[in-house]
Image: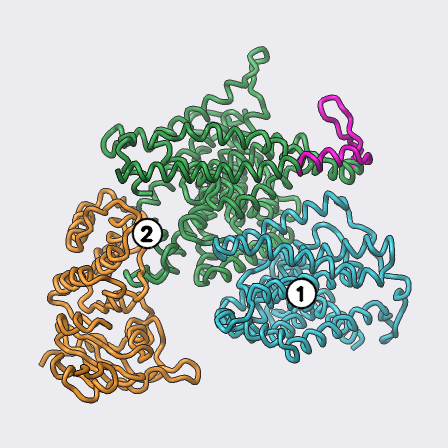
Amino acid sequence: MELLLVSLLNGLVYGMLLFMLASGLTLIFSMMGVLNFAHASIYMLGAYFAYDVSRHIGFWPALVVAPVLCGGLGALIEMYGLRRVHRNGHIAELLFTFGLAFIIEKAVQMIWGLLPVPYRVPAALDHTLFHVYGTNFPAYRGFMLLVSALMFLAIWLMLTRTRMGLVIQAALTHPEMVGALGHNVPRVFTTVFAGGCALAGLAGVIGGNYLVTEPSMAFTMGPIVFVVVVFGGLGSLAGCFIASLIMGFVQTFAVVLEYSLADALAAIGIKVSDATALGEVLTIPLPRIGALLPFVMLILILLFRPRGLMGTRDT
Amino acid sequence: MSEILAHPGARPVPTTGAAAFARRHGPWFLALAVALALPWLFYDWSRARHSGFVVAMLSQMSMMAIFALSYNMQMGQAGLLSFGHAVFFGLGGYCTAHALNAVKGGSFWLPTELVPLVGGVGGLVFAIVFGYVATKQRATAFAMITLGIGELVTACALMFHTFFGGEGGVSTNRMIGTSLLGWSYGPSIQVYYLIVAWTAIAVALMMLLTRTPLGRMANACRDNFERAQFVGYDPSIVRFFQFALSGFFAGIAGGLYTLTYEIVTFDTVAGAMSANALLMTYIGGVGAFAGPVLGAVLIVLLQSWVSLLSNSWLVYVGVLFIVMVTFAPGGIAGILLMHEPLWRAGRLGRLAVPYARLLAPGVIAVAGFVLLVELCSFLTIGAAQGKAFKLSGLTIDPQHPGAWLIGALLLGAGGLVLWREGRRFRAAWEALVEEIKAGARA
Amino acid sequence: MSEAAIRLSDVHKSFGPTPIIMGVSLDITRGERHAIIGPNGAGKTTLFNLISGRLPLSRGRIELDGQAIDGLPAHRINRLGLSRSFQITSIFPRMTVFENVRCGLLWSMGYRYSFWHLLGRESRLNAAAEQLLADVNLESRRDLPAGLLSYAEQRALEIGITIAGGARTVLLDEPTAGMSRSEANHAVALIRRVTEGKTLVMVEHDMSVVFDLADVVTVLVYGQVIASGPPAEIRASRAVQDAYLGTAAH
């Protein structure tokens, strides 16, 4: 019971972090048709910027400065990079963002070094919030939940209550039509792209000290975020939210459940040992194959339901 | 463009007979001769042995050429963007390693010369399995699923021991004593000759494939999905076949890898290797058959030499890639091919001066950029490794602002002049093209 | 009585809540030249898309030579003997004109997904492709990349690819759109020649082409057939004049 509750909470925290990243990516992908490979790289930059800012000024300013920097960078990339490459087609855009991700990783290695940087949780939040059956629930995780919930609320309000938000919603499912109606689609695109990057940056600020801040974090987090986006489906933020939570729970529970396929088979009376064919695959416990699970999910969903959970368009 | 080709002053192009064959395939035979001869240029006569460095680099180039060409079967010819091509390279390598160990252990007999074929078959089988799932999808979903498969296989390669040997990989020994030529394959030059032979075979086969119904329909599906359906073809099956065959050739490259290095680890299936295929193929040029070969040669060259001098050679590759994506989507081969009409019309010499004007600011801008990158790198990575920034005898201190200013100045000034000269170059180019067109109409 | 090459039975098509085709029943007799006309937005191209398998039906049945084809994928319908051209020219722009036509022949000549035949050596295939090029008067353009042809030439090429596979039923979607008078006349002569003995269904806006070429004319307005018959009958019909053709000003 204790394990269940603790894992649920941890899964929720991780899932909300994933949602921060995936929501920006889904918006960009659904509207502009660009799969932004560099999205997780911006997340990484957010963490590194926050690290630098909190070293010199403090954590709380970093919470604002880092996302703004990332948003600005996103705007520059969209206006001077993507827009130029756009006329060469979708594949060229994908390759461009891929190249960008590549360069950002190398640049980070050059500027901050190859090893993880000591980006720590601020002292003010470094205590226990409450106890769950004897385990501590750190205040910082509560803070993360708060920030992600506030951000979710802000996005929802912006999308449903403001004019720009309505245009974005329309452009999510019918981009050409929105342009035909006379809205300044390039400006909308730049805004969404920059906004998505700012969100990724914010995720980096609060995630960077929760997880490790190192140059490879973009390429470890990136694929998982893609899986979430595909799983949730194009054109649907609600689907993205559900998919993020599911992924958060799957990855958290996988680590704590020490079972394997062999155990499941034993429950119905089939004995598996190391010597049986594929024995190695069947006896490996869940925590060890945790890294595999997102990709198994990706392949399954693309096989059986290419639209994703709640997608309105085919990928 | 057609008018340029039809220009009366254009050099006549033979289309039949031996002359045509020589013209079309001559460069390949030349390349083969060069490949065979090159190690001897660096042969150390006094000690009667080959330069290990050169032979290793040339071997790598050939392997990567096959790998990149196989990738282009998907990217350039079928319009498929895959982020997991290394899977077939690596799995081919693993299969070959196990086969070599089995032959050594006496389970069956296989001549050493045919060992890469095991890799090919392994690559083919896995490509059929994964391709069945992947090729049902369109564009972006296909890219994602290949990414997922790549990550999946990499994770498996780290986890499972029976087939993959876990983190340590699978070691093997290529001296299995079953050579048809009586060679031991101990010396790396012998392995090199085997690699060159297989490269020639692979290149020839892949080239012939482009002239088959499947090859042509792959192009057709790339160009116009719908029209391909309305000439009776199921585009996803066309893609499936193309995908499977490209896995076969990637597997051959993987087999050659195993023979050369005698160990296969998870990085042969990892994302970095897939990215490598993408970079080599794209930079070389997806539109021309030989493009990926150019890309492979260039990248391996950079990898072998620049990586000795600098930690940041990947940054240069990345920047080169992005510049290509933005300004020259046809790659190096594309740029070269753009010059063909001018060469035919005998006007190529007129570009000598405009190119020369680009050269000076170009070199300065690049020098400035390299300086800044290296300064950055030495500031962090170099310092951690205890290396100092030495340039032809001079030690440059990255902490000192002076070097940074010089770098910024070179990049800025060079870049601005380059921009201006670039405009002028473009005008000169267009004037030439107009001139040729006018001449054709006259 | 000739059998129907294409039979549409109470065909309906809606995009979401919007109905486009509202109960069309139509028989196209084997061997006839059938034109479908109507104002813009009537659903003519949608009808083509439904027949050729590009779009799924909402309700109803479509039969080709007596066999139900609704729900089949486009390439299967093509293999059953139906071919089409598109409103927006659809060819293979990066391949040469010759290769374009040759691609159209591959499946019907049995090559399937072969990766062991070298196309250069397939004399029967290449001869057939040359013949096809001659039929559409594009021999002089043989080795040009198709994307470089003039508009009218591309339309001719498209017709060539469409008939290459030997389909017995040919759908042409606005084949003379965007052409000058003389180009259109050439196109009509070409179409008449190459569809000899086949069933032809075409969507057209150019009335002179319609009355020149067609044996039967069907008028489609707002997703429904309001008239169907020989050209003279249609021209004289009051209902059609009101809906579409208009009366000549005196």
Q: Which residues are magenta?
A: B385-412
Which chain does tag 1 point to? A
The letter of the orange chain is C
User: Which class describes the residues within 10 Å of circle 1: few (<14), some (14-19), or many (20+)?
Assistant: many
User: Is residue A286 found inside the magenta-colored segment of the image?
Assistant: no
Residue B253 placement (x, y as % from top left)? 49, 40
Residue C180 placement (x, y as % from top left)? 22, 61
Query: Could you say which is closer to the camera, residue C146 or residue A279?
Result: C146
Which corner quadrant of the image does residue A220 belong to? bottom right
Query: Could you say which is closer to the camera, residue A232 or residue A28?
Result: A28
Q: Amino acid at mark 1?
A: Gly
Residue sitting at x 48%, y 40%:
B426
Residue A240 placement (x, y as % from top left)? 62, 72
Picture quarter with the N terminus of chain B: top left
The answer to whether one can see residue B51 in this image is: yes
Chain A colour? cyan
Chain B colour? green
Q: Residue placed farthest to the left in the image?
A: C1
Q: Amino acid at mark 2?
A: Gly
Residue sitting at x 17%, y 70%:
C209
- For the image, the number of numbered tags is 2
